[in-house]
Image (cartoon, rainbow, N blue to C red):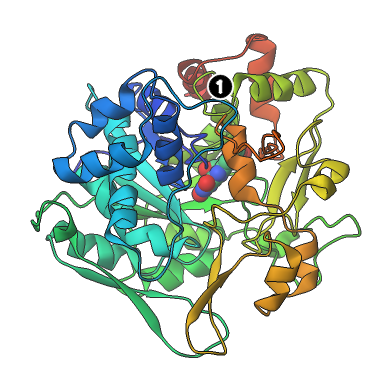
Amino acid sequence: MRKHPAIIQGGMGIAVSSWRLAKDVAIQGELGVISGTAIDSVMARRLQDGDPTGDTQRALSHFPDVIVVQEILKRFFIEGGKDPKRPYIDVPKLIVKPTAFALHLLIVSTFVEVWLAKENHDGLVGMNILEKIQLAIPAQLYGAMLAGVDYILIGAGIPAQIPRLLNWLSLGNSITMKVDVEDTNDKYQIGFDPACIDGVHYPIKRPQFLAIVSSHALVSYLNKDAETKPDGFVIEYHVAGGHNAPPRAKNSTDANGEAVYSDADMPNLEKVVASGSPFWLAGGFGTPEKFVEAKALGAQGIQVGSIFALCNESGFTPELRSQVLSSLAAGETRVVTDASASPTGFPFKVIELDATLSEPELFAKRARKCDLGYLRTPFKRESGGIGYRCPGEPIDTYLFKNGEEEEALTSKCLCNALMADIGLGQIRPDGRTELALITIGSDLVGPMQLLARFPDGWSAKQGLNYLRTAQ
Ligand SMILES: Cc1cc2nc3c(=O)[nH]c(=O)nc-3n(C[C@H](O)[C@H](O)[C@H](O)COP(=O)(O)O)c2cc1C
């Protein structure tokens, strides 16, 4: 087995950790991670934009099942790109019993992103997905494995089933996975058969699996059983960008709607060290000094997000990136840990930035719509079937599905906003494009120090060199 890397470039959705970023980090000898979240929509929109660089089509030409690729190109590829005023065609939403096409699209788009990140070098590439988006997991694991992914990293939930799924898939076997369905005690599971591609069960390389957790208790819980034991852990502190684990204490939201953390939310690293599992520290560890400290604490190294989210190769549009960098330079950046913005129910870090959904008036003006639906939760309908609801959808619809009003009022449509962050925002019938919403860590020492060195922005390589300066 290859030596673990010391630096993990965090998986940042949606496609902020693009294949370009992950590839550059991997070439520099660290672990480059792509985000698999909503990658089917990302690929479908890149194809509708005409795939101007040809990268997606090049990767598609290496996918083992030509017929599957042809059906995808037929549905989404537009030579020369769509009319910029026309909306994108959506991909099928995730459901418990997906069509063959929907599964193929998930597998292929994940394959493409990993394949591109791994092209022409032998560095290490990982894929990050969210446990919360359960319905996509089996197909995405398989798509990533078909492209030879080296690591899978999963947080935002308790990823207890993943080691077993990876074992089975690597043997070429069909798998079943338990899924959470609300409003019932009934048990549900989804099945996945790798033979849906090419009619073949391939034995395939098993990637390493790192669970992203924020407490030592979860480390011991997952390590208890060989079936749930990951190959290592990323221990994420609550200053990290993206979603954070909810505070342990009840009523831990302040008057501004921010999650408030205390010492009880700090992981006990001695217990993590005692577990014997390799681990990386994340959340405010993106400086040379914190990298040294992490190693002294017994970690393999660090997982870093914010400095890569703001580097030249990140998926954020250049306009949004420079807006954030200007606010950093002016010392005006305010990051809040919004307890209720995310439909997942997890606190979510948000930068207060002009012309984004972080502005209450703009949020209030947005017509609610749930047309991507990655964060929908399955629930059992009174009639017996399975329904899907998201607190970000129109409030009446959510209430009709027995959702709670309080949850819905402040919930933002992260799916559409995060697509807008990477320049793939949906166009609405009135001609408006969906607004962005930017997440970043609340410890910005690393980005500030890099900005002082590189006022016009930095590359992933410069970010890595900076992190290694105290080694
Ligand atoms: C823009 C952005 C998006 C993120 N998205 C995800 C994600 O989709 N999944 C995930 O596990 N972590 C996500 N994270 C967390 C990072 O992977 C990483 O753990 C974290 O940023 C480390 O803390 P730092 O920001 O202080 O470096 C995100 C972070 C940022 C800044």
Q: Does residue 284 appear to the left or right of 298 in the view shown? A: right
What's the residue type where badge 1 is placed? Cys
Looking at the image, can residue 123 be seen? no
In the displayed structure, would residue 334 be above or below residue 384? above
Quadrant hosting ligand 1 = top right
Between 96 and 429, the one lying in front of the other is 429
Q: Quadrant of residue 116?
A: top left
Question: Which residue is identified by label 1?
Answer: 311
Looking at the image, can residue 350 be seen? yes
Q: Quadrant of the N terminus?
A: top left
In the displayed structure, would residue 248 be above or below residue 329? below
Specify few, some or many for label 1: CA neighbours under 10 Å numbering under 14, 14-19, or 20 or more: many
Position in image of residue 380 (x %, y %):
52, 83
Can you name the residue that lies furthest to the right here?
255
Position in image of residue 265 (x %, y %):
67, 61
Q: Does residue 210 appear to the left or right of 132 in the view shown? A: left
Between 296 and 384, the one lying in front of the other is 384
Residue at point 74%, 69% (across, down): 396
Position in image of residue 19 (x %, y %):
39, 30
Residue at point 48%, 47% (across, down): 90
Residue at point 61%, 13% (across, down): 457
Ligand 1 within 8 Å, label 1 CB: no
In the displayed structure, would residue 412 be above or below residue 123? below
Q: Secondary structure at mark 1?
A: loop
Q: Quadrant of residue 195?
A: bottom left
